[in-house]
Amino acid sequence: MSPRLNLFRASRSLAIRSKSSVSPYQPRIFQTTARRGFADEKATGPNQDVLGHVSEEAADMGDITGETKPDLGQGTPVQEILERDEKGKENAPEVIKKEIQESTEAQALSTEAHALSIEHLVALRQMENIAAGKQASHEVTHGHKFGVPDLPIPSMSNLHYRYDTVVDQVTNLIMEHGKLSKAQRDMSFILNHLRTAPPPQVNPARPLLPGTPPPSHLPLNPVLYLTAAIDSVAPLLRIRSMKGAAGGGTALQLPAPLGLRQRRRTAIKWILDSASKKRSRGSGRGQFAQRVAEEIVSVVEGRSAVWDRRQLIHKTGTSARANLNVMAAKMRRR
Amino acid sequence: MASSGCWKCLLRPSVPVSRPIIANASASFSTTTTLNANPPKKKTGAVKIVKPHQRAGSSLKIKKKAFVKPAGRPPMPGERKALRKRIVLSNTNALEVPMTDLSKDNLLDETLVGKVAGLPDVVVDQLRAVEAFKITQGWGLFRRPAILVREDSVKLARMLEAATEKKEACRVLLDGQRGAGKSMLAVHAMASAFLKGWVVINIPEAQELTTATTDYSPVPNTTPQLYSQDTYVANLLSQIGKANNAVLSTLTLSMEHKDAPIPLQSNISLARLVELGARDPDIAWPLFNIFWREITAAGRPPVMMAMDGLSYFMQYSEYRNPDFDLIHAHDLALVKHLMDHLSGSTKLPNGGAILGVMSRSHAPKSLAADLAITQTEERQLGRPRTKADPFTKYDERSLKVLGNVPVLRLQGLSRAEARGLMEYWASSGVMRTVVDEKTVAEKWTLAGNGIVGEIERGALKMRI
């Protein structure tokens, strides 16, 4: 059953709202045309121009038609004359004095209201944008109580982006059985070990990623230390094998590039693997973390077997890159 | 079993009973070798016999993972524990921070409040000897051991000063939330005692005395029966000797001890006396008593006794008496000695201090201690006293001991103190953020209004 048409409901959307003195929020993109007016706003639309008095109208008409215009000076009201004449104002009758005062007060009020209007504020800020060397259409940054957030969100700004990206990834890969808190404690142990261990002696045969600060700077920036170790041993590619594509049931090896996060993941996995195969020297709960930390130091010093794994992958990738052509040719034949 | 014949009339059975079967028909002794068939051949692995009902092929086989022996030399006996208990007091990577050292003169200095003061090397060695540093404290992150001077440290220093002047014991119970800095304040107090030339005796973990991990033996001629822990006391004497050597080596025996277990020369120093006790656990407890008589004699320096994890003393220990009943902690001789001084029933004639430090992270719940602390605090603040719950069983002996021990409750740091601490961290290069009003306010608030352990956790440990 269709609902009955209710004409009373239609008027509900036409609310009569009084204009607030200060706009509660500032829209980022301002659209003048789409804005709805306030009920008591002095609208100045195309049809709402106030005409001048009779002689002014006649003068305007004369401008348009080219006929002789009436002399405006003749029919000018006393008030207009008094506006220009300061001495005359003092001698004017009390009634007129009062009128002049009231009119100036009303004018002041109206200009104040104008200064507070949204259009005015936006225009002002657009001008500020231009002054700052931006486009007028650029986002108006004023008016946000806490400003617009920076992107990507810096590590201190949001609960969910609290930790450094690498630290977060390593923590998640250390985690077992969903015990994040334990993994975080391990992570803090690792970083503290890197802070307190003596500066690493980098092997020139296995240099760190270019752009890494000198090794003496690393211990006091353990996050950088960790990042340098992981990024330096991260492989550029992985070997994807295609079953039976090489003929005779042999798999065809194809190199495939890895993204940044994937490369890091591989490196972290390798490091954690080799740490878990080591024997711990002490006892207590921080033993795995201790081994991981020692492994990271040995990666930076070029002693770790993780470097060999990376080299092997890269060698295989180099020899297998010819297979990419084979696959491309096969695809073309189809 | 009913017999086949009539048993009443003793008639012969109508059916003859069958002859008994002879079990072994063969001769009991024979020289002929028995000729048995060969045992069935064992199936070899290569030949697989498939039974008709068995399907060949797909059956679930779970292979056991072979145990991978970890590479490398296994750790030597004791090496693992040594690594676990190792205390590192320096980080050569951390930057050196210019700061004033604690000294005898600036202990009461209020301008030092909110600043970090270094511990002089001599005092560091002494504190290490009495095991005042703990592995959970962050000493290993900084260039050299240093400690934050807070309002409460100056307050405690003033109490110690007053005790020295009045020649009586300053008895204090340190309490506060987990991570509020109780043990750290005890370190501060011990450092100031060392600086003043006091004799310091420290029980780093109360649980070592009560959890039945060290040997015990009854002390003869005591009622109620007391038990001494000789190995522990011997070790304690060696610690006392090492830490207070500078003071004890200048003092000599002043009286004759007829109850000495070994003949003592009349002119030996107290350091030597302590060394004798440390050498032989069998005479450690009697020599400790002699040492105590000497150190409390007239004209000797004040003594500070500190103990951490006090709630282990406020309950039954895990030791058993000959009737196999649990022994109360206060029936252990060393614990009784400490408790007598803490409760004030035994005086320190030369002045000194007894610090009891509660532990709020790894300690049994002691209802008696909690009640006593609450009541004492209420008395200190002039509030109406909480009454004991009539349906709860409190440990009466503990209530009696802690009944009138003044309590010093540690709250969080003030903002200024937190800022001073964080500036020290930042200038050591360990904290990598700018220390401004915003950072301080954030860390301070997130740490439960300045609980110092939590500030450290948030700024140094978990977040770097």
Image: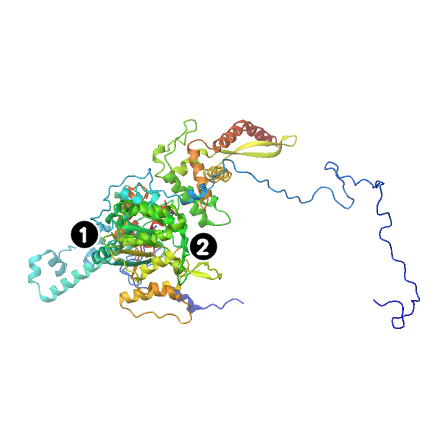
Image coordinates of residue A219 in percent, x first then y, are 36, 37
In percent of width and height, residue A261 lies at 46, 40
For residue A260, the mark is none
Left or right of B108? Residue B45 is right
In front of the other: A67 or B144: B144
Where residue B391 sits: x, y (%)?
A: 42, 71
Name the foreground residue: A324 vs B330.
B330
Residue type at numbered disc 2: Ala
User: Residue B18 sits in which quadrant?
Assistant: bottom right
- Host chain of mark 1: A
Q: Quadrant of residue A10?
A: bottom left
Query: Tag 2, which chain?
Result: B
Tag 2, which secondary structure? loop
List the single residue furthest toward the right. Answer: B14
Q: Secondary structure at mark 1?
A: loop
Return the residue at label 1. Answer: A68
Quadrant assignment for the N terminus of chain B = bottom right
Q: Amino acid at mark 1?
A: Thr
- The residue to which callout 2 is attached is B212
Q: Residue at x 9, y 60 (%)?
A: A89
Mark 2 to mark 1: distance in Å?
Answer: 122 Å
In the rendered image, the vertical position of residue A210 relative to residue B320, given as above or below: above
